[in-house]
Amino acid sequence: MADMKKLIEKSNRYLMSTYKRFPIVLRKGRGCRVYDTNGKEYLDFVAGIAVNVLGHSHPAVVVAVQKQAQRLIHVSNLYHIEPQIRLAELLVENSFADRAFFCNSGAEANEAAIKLVRKYSHDHFGPDRHEIITALNSFHGRTMATLTATGQEKFHKGFEPLLEGFRYIPFDDLEALEKAITPQTAAVMLEPIQGEGGVRVPSPDYLKRVRELCDRNELLLVLDEVQTGIGRTGRLFAYEHFGIEPDIITLAKGLGGGVPIGAMLAREEVAKSFVPGTHASTFGGNPLAAQAALATLEKVLEDGLLLEECKEKGEYFMERLRELQKEHEDIVLDVRGLGLMIGLELARECTPVVEEALERGFLLNCAAGNTLRFTPPLLVTEGEIDRLIDLLHDIFGRLS
């Protein structure tokens, strides 16, 4: 077994410093648990940042990847790919959409959506109608276009000049959105729930009113479901909670069950603006990634049981966190979320809590500086949730 200290030294020597990594090396995982190279067990409430919806090394995904790797790993999109076709069918038949485009990540999916918005608007309204309105505290990716779409200045610093054509408005503020619309506006792009922004859930009627506003002004509505998609909120897609249908959605994270894959789904009228030569991806939806996503999606959709359990466990989780809030009002400011995408806002910076939890065998994540973001596998049990609550109660008790 490799020495963890030596591996970390090599990591610091050979990898670019784009991450502030925690001082462990994870070697294997099963379900909601992962193990480092020293054999220490951790209960995982991060799940690869909302990626491992079925937990670690789920048999359905493992077997699918093994079998596909023996058959065919990659051929490129110059040819038809059977697992990709079947995946597209399953996504389309279970959503508002008519067409799918596959890529490798959430940033690429959002980049594709931005390009499709501009191409559609150019085709129907001419070249001057190209602006996209996004929300403050949003997060859409790290490419230049998605970075610019992200409404957080801290991610922009050092990368100026940013891409022209984006305007920012406060999230969950319809009046601000209405005022921001100009003759140059082509689309509104929002996360149904802001993830990196601190798990911000909008008012129940906000997205419905945004949809109406887009319809009145002939604007496209793009929903970034990179974090919220594939069952995370208790529905296959978060937009289903709000009684609307977007024109475009983007997916990644949970779609592949841990294997990198992204997708953009769109209505037929909009999708028609992409023709051969307008957009592409060498690896997008290749046989291996598509087969992993197909196995993941089939498992999530199986009898709807997993989605119903996600909803129930999310409600249980938030109720336990609200009990914690009552006991530690000086530390816990708010509990919010939907399904198993939950935020616990603290009255202080949350990194020390994450660090102590790591020492005690729990993987947690901090968003927006002071919010603990919980995105465990959908298979997490109430007993595992209770273990986390006990840990937080102990940590907060000493902080008080």
Image (cartoon, rainbow, N blue to C red):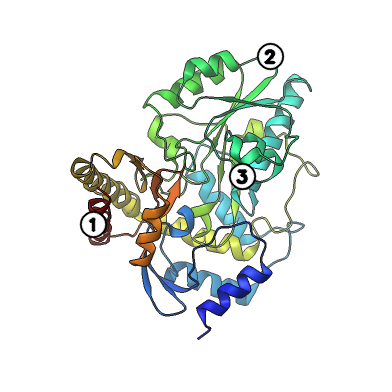
Label 1, label 3: how far apart the Cα atoms are:
35 Å
Residue 160 is situated, as x and y percent measured from the top left of the image, at 73, 37
Disc 2 target residue: 183
Q: Secondary structure at mark 1?
A: helix
Q: Nearer the viewer, mark 2 or mark 3?
A: 3
Q: In the displayed structure, does residue 27 sit left or right of residue 149?
A: left
Between disc 1 and disc 3, whose residue precedes?
A: 3
Determine whether label 2 and label 3 are within 8 Å by CB: no
Task: Estimate the spatial distance between the alpha carbons at disc 2 and disc 3, rounded to whole Å.
Answer: 27 Å
The residue nearer to you, when weighing 95 against 361, is 361
Check whether the beta carbons of the residues at disc 1 and disc 3 lie within 8 A of each other: no
Amino acid identity at mark 3? Gly
Q: The disc labelled 2 sits on which kind of residue?
A: Pro
Q: Residue at x 77, y 57 (%)?
A: 78
**Is 359 on the left or on the right of 398, as rendered?**
right
Among the two numbered marks 2 and 1 on one chain, the one whose residue lies closer to the N terminus: 2
How far apart, in angstroms, are the residues tagged by discs 2 and 1? 55 Å
- SS at circle 2: loop
**Which percent across, then down, holds residue 33?**
37, 68
Judge by depth and name the residue closer to the eye, 155 or 343: 155
Amino acid type of the residue that numbered disc 1 sits on in the rendered structure: Asp
Q: Residue at x 47, y 46 (%)?
A: 229
Residues under numbered marks 2 and 1 in contact, where contact means CB atoms less than 8 Å apart: no
Q: In the image, what residue occupies the spot 76% across and 34% down?
A: 161
Q: Which mark is residue 394?
A: 1
* Residue 32 in view here: no
